[in-house]
């Protein structure tokens, strides 16, 4: 087999592998969607039935408004709204605070800066469980349990990972630009706002994206701090729905899950390029 | 002025607006002249509705207090968190077994004085139930809905295999024989239906020992989970796994539905007999009204062990730090009255914990076996959970051992010895710490 | 007018202040408080009482602690390499310039976006012994060998593998990072090795992997930190770590101790032990990698 043939063979192999693997990766999603659309009886058939006999689009409506009258559950729309509110606050805080802090680490000189940065990196190794109890006690002291504050206020104080990401990026912006502006008499704030920030849209978007995903996804935080059901987020709401003794309504459960997954996937489709670009720019790989 | 000069102020306003909104979402409701009593309950669906009717009736009966009832899942944990978080409800519906832990932790307040003032006394109740709420001589919880358990069996299945549907088993040996006859397996070992599954519904895994005459705790600091009677009980539990076949049983169990669903093992004819409570009638009515079933006292494991039953109870407590304890108690008093109690218990199709039953309650009760359940509440072999504060952990350990036993991973003696070895130091330390704080 | 240096320093602190504050309040204070609590009997409802090393001694003799630790380590030891290998292999496949790469990339990436709770709920159904789809599909192949899919949810030997399977399904984001790293490998190096007669495997081993070794290290460390803390998925799929505590992981036991048994001192001790473990493992990884990690430009 000559080089050319070997190459082609290799490419075919790769194509085949990709197709097979994609199919495998897609199966759970297909199962999710088909189950969401089935009438309840068909979810428990043996052997399993792939295609629903009729498409119960109503399942989505049921999942979203389930039990509104038969008290016990709040509609998923309520959880959806709560989660969105929380996400807005968390994303805003993450972007705002981390941009400032990373800028300071990247482009301003101050005594102890590099030591502080090493400590910052080190904090990425602190697991949440070790902070869980005292943080709870702290919020208890402030009377914040049961509110959203423990979930979004810390986001306004920076986080190691985002600082790391943004710092890497900010360091790639030529320092000459800042120097020139300083000579023209611009304040640090002006330089930050009018020169560096506009050039950093992609990096900031990546930070925002990660922050959104983290917030949308968060379970342990709401589990500990949210008590009143009407304040639950989607994660907590779904788990509450699933853990009730009221029998496993798989089709509704899958419908509800789809509703939670969908916005994230839609968001991804719109920001794909940004995302991938962002990972490259911020030098995560190196 | 370029456009971008506006972005920051606009964003700031947007964020502030969102903050305000988020506060609004989690803030208490606006004042309307009434005292709002926050009431957290564990129930959902029709059981929740039953209590809601009582709440509505109370709210209508006067205009000073409004009780706001909320269904909370994982209530025993959430409430403790709320209490330690400083934001407890004013009244909470816990499970009987939780009371000791709450009392030990000062998480709920003693109700003796309020009971005395309201004329609520022990002799108005079936003793077994009243006592569940009494810890170290003080009343920390009052009964809401009581329960007893009995053997529920499928009459049609009995007939099908040649058993007399009017003569349910009265001893454990008879139960075993009946289970054998009722079990159906395919040639390759695949289980089609089981006669009896000790893991259904799996809510009282701790009770098997006491049913066989064993004790879980000697009230003197000693864990007695591995006593001979208890071991004998779990050996009996394990023999079902042995008879059905380990892997086959696992597969079979994996396909069973949840309790409140049409795939419930008993209601879907996959299990011929099971231990269940007084509410079961209602669920059968909902999911399989055509089923021909009956309830009987659970078979006895030996002389002196007749009519064993689990006596359990849902309770009402007032958390420490509640903002409106007096008003909360007004509501509790209403629930404890004959009128309130019967409204609630009839709504949930259970028996009432009060001795005085109004005319017609029993006669009009839809559960055909209601008299049996009431009689069982007076049984001298009624068992309830031991009163130790670390019951939560002890129960987890017992459940874990039960799991290992039914999966045939350990012998009952091994599994129970392990539970004892693990729990004894925990209990010792727990009691030490209590003493160090001046309790006990 | 302040000197340029002083002015810059002032702004430096000002801009960094959110983090300096945040670090102190939300990291430093809890870390220190946590150590203090670990030496106390504490339950938030009651004030802490100093009890010395009691909690640590108790942990040493606590069988459940060791089970939780063992489970967590067993899970990490398998999930981490499995995940990394899968991510790297997928990245390499995507790196080969074949048609439809963006579609494949999307398909592999999307599962990693699924929120943990939905993931748990979805896979509970996928893995279900009687009604799920995994076994029927597997059995099409396994039945040829007279084998059949195991009871993922109820067999203690297969519950952890079930979790590993799920985590592999979600390697999409790691894959993207490796892909970015791969695309950075200078083409000349690959061509040079080809000219030297290297075949696919040799190219991978001696050129590609070393070139992306910093990425591997970074992901590896983040992976260790992540898998040791796993909580949400097992908590939802396998309540109480059933069957037989096979999926009872460290964080869940910590959570149970803190918020269900109200032994917050005990939980704090567990937290600190986890932190020390992570520090140790990270340090070891970095030391071990010094020989193998090549940074571009060195």
Image (cartoon, coloured by chain):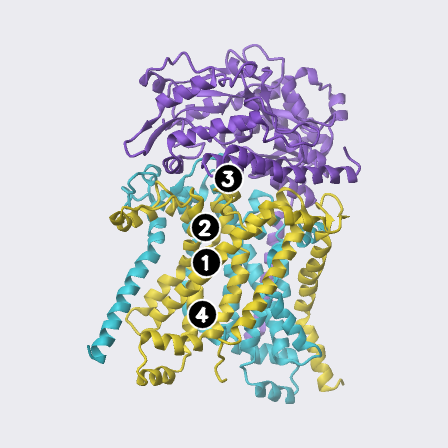
Chain colours: A cyan, B purple, C yellow
Q: Is residue B161 left or right of residue C294?
A: left
Q: CA distance from mark 2 to mark 3?
A: 32 Å
- Look at the image and tell me in which quarter the C terminus of chain B lies: top right
Q: Are marks 4 and 2 on the same chain?
A: yes
Question: Which numbered disc flags the more N-terminal residue, 2 or 1?
Answer: 1
- Label 3 neighbour load within 10 Å: few <14, some 14-19, many 20+: many
- Residue A232's spot in the image, x, y percent? 55, 47
- Label 4 neighbour load within 10 Å: few <14, some 14-19, many 20+: many
Q: Are marks 2 and 3 on the same chain?
A: no
Q: CA distance from mark 2 to mark 1?
A: 9 Å
At 68% from the left and 54% from the top, the residue drawn is: A134
* Secondary structure of the residue carrying numbered label 2: helix
Q: Are marks 2 and 1 on the same chain?
A: yes
Q: Which residue is mark 3?
A: A73
Q: CA distance from mark 1 to mark 3?
A: 36 Å
- Label 2 neighbour load within 10 Å: few <14, some 14-19, many 20+: many
Q: Which residue is mark 4?
A: C177
* Chain to which mark 3 belongs: A
- Mark number for residue C160? 2
- Mark number for residue B328? none
Q: Is residue B118 left or right of residue B346?
A: right
Question: Which numbered disc flags the more N-terminal residue, 4 or 1?
Answer: 1
Q: Which residue is mark 1?
A: C79
Q: CA distance from mark 4 to mark 3?
A: 40 Å
């Amino acid at each position: 087999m000559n080089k050319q043939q070997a190459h082609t063979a290799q490419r075919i192999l790769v194509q085949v592998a990709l197709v097979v693997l994609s199919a495998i990766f897609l199966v759970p999603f297909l199962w999710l969607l088909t189950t969401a659309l089935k009438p309840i009886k068909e979810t428990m058939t043996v052997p399993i039935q792939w295609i629903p006999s009729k498409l119960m689009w109503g399942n989505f409506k049921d999942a979203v408004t389930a039990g509104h009258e038969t008290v016990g559950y709040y509609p998923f729309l309520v959880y959806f709204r709560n989660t969105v509110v929380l996400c807005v606050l968390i994303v805003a805080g993450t972007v705002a605070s981390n941009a400032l802090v990373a800028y300071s680490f990247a482009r301003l000189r101050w005594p102890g800066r590099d030591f502080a940065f090493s400590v910052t990196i080190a904090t990425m190794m602190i697991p949440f469980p070790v902070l869980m109890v005292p943080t709870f006690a702290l919020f208890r002291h402030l009377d914040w349990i049961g509110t959203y504050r423990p979930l979004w206020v810390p986001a306004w104080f920076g986080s190691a990972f985002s600082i790391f990401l943004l710092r890497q990026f900010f360091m790639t912006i030529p320092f000459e630009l800042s120097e020139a502006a300083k000579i023209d008499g611009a304040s640090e704030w002006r330089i930050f706002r009018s020169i560096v920030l506009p050039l950093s849209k992609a990096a900031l978007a990546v930070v925002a994206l990660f922050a959104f995903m983290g917030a949308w996804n968060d379970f342990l935080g709401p589990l500990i701090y949210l008590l009143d059901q009407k304040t639950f987020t989607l994660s907590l709401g779904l788990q509450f729905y699933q853990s009730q003794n009221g029998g496993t309504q798989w089709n509704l459960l899958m419908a509800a899950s789809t509703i939670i997954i969908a916005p994230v996937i839609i968001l991804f489709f719109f920001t794909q390029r940004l995302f991938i670009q962002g990972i490259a720019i911020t030098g995560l790989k190196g | 002025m370029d456009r971008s000069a506006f972005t920051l102020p606009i964003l700031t306003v947007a964020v502030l607006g969102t903050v305000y909104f988020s506060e609004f979402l989690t803030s208490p409701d606006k004042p309307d002249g009434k005292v709002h009593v926050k009431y957290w309950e564990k129930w959902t669906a029709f059981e929740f509705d039953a209590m809601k009717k009582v709440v509505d009736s109370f709210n209508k009966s006067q205009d000073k207090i409004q009780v706001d009832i909320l269904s909370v899942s994982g209530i025993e944990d959430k409430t403790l968190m709320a209490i330690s978080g400083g934001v407890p409800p004013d009244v909470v519906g816990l499970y009987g077994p939780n009371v000791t832990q709450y009392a030990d932790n000062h998480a709920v307040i003693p109700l003796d004085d309020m009971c005395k003032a309201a004329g609520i006394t022990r002799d108005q109740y079936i003793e077994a139930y009243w006592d569940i709420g009494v810890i170290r001589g003080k009343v920390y919880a009052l009964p809401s809905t009581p329960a007893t358990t009995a053997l529920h069996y499928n009459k049609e299945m009995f007939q099908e295999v040649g058993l007399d549907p009017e003569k349910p088993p009265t001893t454990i040996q008879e139960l075993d024989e009946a289970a054998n006859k009722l079990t159906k397996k395919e040639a390759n070992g695949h289980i089609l239906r089981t006669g009896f599954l000790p893991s259904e519904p799996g809510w009282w895994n701790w009770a098997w020992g006491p049913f066989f005459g064993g004790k879980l705790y000697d009230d003197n600091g000693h864990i007695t989970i591995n006593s001979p009677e208890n071991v004998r009980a779990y050996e009996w539990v394990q023999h079902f796994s042995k008879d059905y076949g380990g892997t086959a049983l696992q597969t079979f169990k994996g396909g069973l539905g949840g309790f409140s669903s049409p795939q419930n093992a008993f209601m879907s004819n996959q299990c011929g007999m099971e231990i269940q409570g007084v509410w079961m009638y209602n669920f059968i009515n909902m999911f399989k009204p055509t089923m021909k079933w009956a309830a009987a006292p659970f078979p006895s494991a030996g002389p002196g062990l007749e009519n064993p039953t689990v006596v359990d109870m849902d309770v009402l407590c007032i958390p420490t730090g509640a903002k409106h304890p007096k008003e909360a108690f007004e509501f509790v008093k209403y629930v404890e009255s004959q009128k309130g109690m019967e409204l609630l218990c009839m709504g949930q199709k259970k028996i009432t914990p009060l001795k005085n039953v109004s005319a017609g309650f029993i006669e009009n009760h839809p559960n055909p076996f209601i008299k049996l359940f009431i009689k069982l509440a007076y049984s001298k072999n009624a068992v309830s959970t031991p009163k130790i504060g670390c019951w939560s952990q002890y129960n987890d350990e017992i459940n874990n051992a039960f799991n290992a036993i039914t999966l045939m991973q350990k012998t009952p003696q091994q599994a129970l010895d392990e539970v004892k070895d693990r729990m004894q130091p925990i209990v010792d330390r727990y009691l030490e710490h209590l003493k160090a704080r001046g309790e006990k | 007018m302040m000197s340029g240096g002083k002015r810059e320093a002032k702004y430096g602190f000002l801009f960094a202040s959110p983090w300096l504050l945040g670090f102190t309040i939300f990291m430093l204070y809890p870390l220190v408080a946590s150590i203090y609590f670990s030496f106390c009997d504490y339950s938030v409802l009651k004030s802490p009482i100093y009890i010395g090393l009691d909690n640590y001694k108790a942990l040493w003799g606590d069988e459940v602690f060791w089970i939780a630790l063992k489970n967590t380590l067993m899970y990490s030891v398998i999930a981490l390499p499995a995940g990394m290998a899968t991510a790297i292999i997928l990245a390499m496949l995507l790196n080969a310039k074949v048609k439809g790469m963006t579609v494949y990339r999307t398909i592999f990436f999307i599962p990693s976006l699924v929120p943990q709770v939905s993931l748990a709920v979805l896979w509970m159904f996928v893995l279900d012994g009687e009604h799920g789809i995994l076994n029927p599909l597997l059995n099409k192949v396994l039945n040829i060998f007279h084998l059949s899919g195991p009871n993922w949810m109820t067999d203690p030997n297969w519950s952890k593998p079930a979790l590993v399977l799920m985590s592999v399904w979600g390697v999409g984001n790691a894959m993207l990072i490796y892909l970015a790293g791969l695309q950075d490998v200078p083409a000349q190096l690959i061509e040079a090795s080809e000219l030297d007669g290297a075949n696919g495997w040799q190219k991978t081993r001696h050129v590609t992997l070393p070139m992306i070794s910093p990425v591997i290290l970074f992901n590896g460390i983040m992976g260790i930190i992540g898998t040791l803390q796993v909580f949400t998925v097992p908590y939802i799929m396998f309540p109480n770590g059933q069957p037989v505590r096979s999926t009872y992981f460290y964080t869940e036991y910590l959570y149970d101790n803190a918020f269900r048994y109200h032994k917050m001192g005990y939980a704090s001790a567990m937290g600190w032990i986890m932190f020390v473990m992570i520090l140790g493992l990270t340090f070891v990884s970095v030391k071990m990698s010094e020989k193998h990690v090549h940074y571009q430009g060195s």
